[in-house]
Image: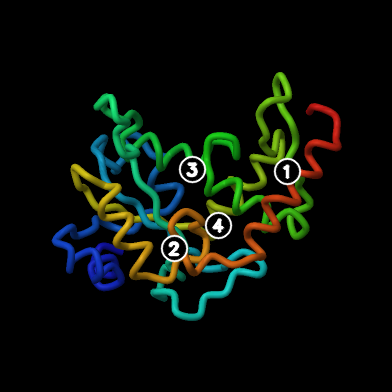
Amino acid sequence: MAAEARLCCHFWVIHRCPPAAVLSCDDVLTRPCPVPAISGVYAWYFDQPPPHVPTQGCHITAAGALLYVGISPKAPPKDGRAGSRPLRSRIRYHFRGNAYGSTLRLTLGSLLSEELGIQLRRVGSGQRMAFGHDEAVVSDWMAHHAHECRAATATPWLLESRLIHNLVLPLNLDQNKHSGAELTAARANQRARARELPIS
């Protein structure tokens, strides 16, 4: 999908930060991983959006609708220490991690909870929340419906901000005027229900 990536991410090109190929879960999890261990911005396309997520105004391609962007590492703290987790490990974590460490997985699982029959739970000591054994269900859904592409940049937080302000990205909450009330409510409801249930 390299040619498609060049077309569907024209906005990135405008900012002189052209993306690499669009990859599936299987692509990302192969060894050696084709995603470089560098800093940058990543974008997620879904050929089937989660329930209650409007795609009007989103960038649509053969890979699906562009619904979310993220960065790795985050902007450095005021003490100037470098951020952790390059693109490779962050993208792999989104595909195979858990909702506690992935905002994207938390969002997807919350929106898909009824359809997939899953529920956020308190795990470990009870301070963290994830989908427990059902994280595998979220991973399977992403393997079937999610693709990602990425663009290398030394200051990914600057490009991320421009993308969020200029594109319709309904799964991004921070800085985003396009995120819907349904997304906020779904996440809040999952957390509230998790607090009522015993630790998994």
Which one is closest to the eye, mark 4 or mark 3? 3
- Name the residue rendered at 18%, 57% in the picture: 17
Which one is closest to the eye, mark 1 or mark 4? 1
- Name the residue rendered at 43%, 57% in the picture: 175
**In the rendered structure, which amino acid carries the disc numbered 4?**
His
Q: How far across and down, in percent of the image, does residue 117 sit? A: 79, 52
Residue where numbered disc 4 is placed: 144
Tell whether label 3 touches label 1 (CB within 8 Å): no
| Cα–Cα gap, marks 4 and 3 | 14 Å
The N terminus is located in which quarter? bottom left
- Name the residue rendered at 24%, 37% in the picture: 38
- Residue 94 got which mark? 3
| Cα–Cα gap, marks 1 and 4 | 26 Å
Mark nearer the N terminus (2 vs 3): 2
| Cα–Cα gap, marks 2 and 3 | 13 Å
Circle 1 residues within 10 Å: few <14, some 14–19, many ≥20: some
Residue where numbered disc 2 is placed: 45
Dot 1: element: helix
Residue where numbered disc 1 is placed: 191
Q: Nearer the viewer, residue 114 or 84?
A: 84
Q: Residue furthest left?
A: 16
Which one is closest to the eye, mark 1 or mark 2? 1
**In the rendered structure, which amino acid carries the disc numbered 3?**
His
Mark nearer the N terminus (4 vs 2): 2
